[in-house]
Amino acid sequence: MEEGSASGQQTEGPMRSTSGNETYSAAVTTSPLKTARKDTGRKVLEALDGHFHLDRMMGKSAKVSEMIQMPLRQAPDPQVRLSGGVAVFCDPAKYSHHILQMVDVPCFVAAIGVHPKNVLSWNAPQKEAFKILMRSPNTKALGEISLDFAAKGIKKQEEVLQYLLRGFADISKPVILHLWGRKGHEDEAYHRGPNLTEACLPREQPIQLHCFSGGADVVARWQRRFPNSYMSFSGLVDSFNEHQKRGLEVVPANRLLLETDCPYLTPNSYIKGQVNTPHRIGEVATLVSQVRQEPLPQVLETANANLRGLFHL
C-alpha cells in the first residue's frame, strides 16, 4: 500500500497464543509445506498472506524462503503456519528479471504492478521491463495498480490504470486494485473505480480489492458490477470506524481475503512502529474474526480457500 522500504534485525521470543478454550501455536519452518512443531494441547492454524511486499521488507535480492525463516523480535499472537501468499512488486525502479526468482517457494506467487506514487515517474525503459515481466508465466497477477486520491497526479493515475487494464488484464489472472480516498472521503476511490474499470474489464474479471476499507454500500456496488471481486482486509481493521466495520461484516464468506501489506500496517496498537511481516497474518485474522463474530479457525479456513482459488495456489 505505502511506498517505501523497511528493514531491521529481529529476534524471536516464545511462541504461544490463546483463543477461547483452545490454544493455537505454530513454529516458523524452513518450508511452508513442512509440518510445524507439534506440542501437546496446541493446534496449529494454517494461514496465507494475500498481499505483501517482499522487496520493501527485506531488500531487492531477498527470497520468500529467507522471509519464512526470518526471526521475529516479538512473536505474533496468534501464531500460524505460513503456507502461501502473494508477493507484490510495484516499484518500477526495481524491475528486473531477478524479481520473479525471489518467489522461490511453492504456493507463493508473484504479482507485478505500478504503485500510485510511481505513476508520474514511470518511464519508457520501466514500461518495457514491465511488459517483459508480465509476459512471464511466473507472473500470476496484475497489480497492485491504482487510484489513490491521497497521491499526486490523479488524472495521470486514471490514464495509467486504464492503459494497464486494457493492455495487460487477463481473465485467467486476478487484477489487484489499490483504491484509496482522501481523509474524510475514504469511499470516493471505491465509487470512482467501477466506472473506470467497467470500460476495460469483463464483468467476470477476478479482482482483489487490496487493503479494503469500504462500507456496506461499497461491498454491494462491487459485488453487483464485478461478482468476482474479493475484499482483502489488513491490519487497518484495527482502526475501522462503524461504517467500515459494517462493510467487513457484510462481505460474503466466499469473497473474504486476508493480507498483511507488510512491511506496513502492523496489527494491534502495542506493536505499532515495528516492521510487519507475513507471519503476523494471524493477527489480522483475529481482528477480522472479532468484527465478523466468527471463530478464528473459520476465518482463516475461509480466507485460505478463497486465496487458493483466486490465485490458483
Image (spheres, grey):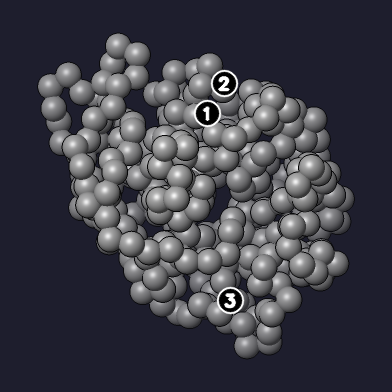
Number of numbered discs present?
A: 3
Name the residue that disc number 3 marks: 92
Disc with the residue nearer the chain's start (3 vs 1):
3
Q: Please tell me whether residue 96 is drawn above or below residue 144 in the rendered image.
A: below
Q: Please tell me whether residue 239 is drawn above or below residue 185 in the rendered image.
A: above
Secondary structure under the numbered disc 2 in the rendered image:
helix
How packed mark 3 is, by other alpha carbons closer than 10 Å (few <14, some 14-19, many 20 or more), is many
Give the percent coordinates (x, y) of residue 283: 42, 35
Name the residue that disc number 2 marks: 292
What residue lies at 81% left-to-right and 44% top-to-bottom? 185
Q: Which of 175 and 144 is in front in this view?
A: 144
Give the percent coordinates (x, y) of residue 234: 54, 41
Q: Which of 151 and 119 is in front in this view?
A: 151
Secondary structure under the numbered disc 3 in the rendered image:
helix
Q: Assess whether mark 1 and mark 3 are in contact (beta carbons under 8 angstroms).
A: no
Badge 3 amino acid: Pro
Secondary structure under the numbered disc 1 in the rendered image:
helix
Name the residue that disc number 1 marks: 288
Q: In this view, does 228 lie to the left or right of 105?
A: right
- As drawn, the label of residue 61 is none
Mark 3 vs mark 2, CA separation in Å: 37 Å
Mark 3 vs mark 1, CA separation in Å: 32 Å
Q: Assess whether mark 1 and mark 2 are in contact (beta carbons under 8 angstroms).
A: yes
Give the percent coordinates (x, y) of residue 46: 33, 35
How packed mark 1 is, by other alpha carbons closer than 10 Å (few <14, some 14-19, many 20 or more), is many
Mark 2 vs mark 1, CA separation in Å: 6 Å
Q: Which of 221 and 248 is in front in this view?
A: 248
Disc with the residue nearer the chain's start (3 vs 2):
3
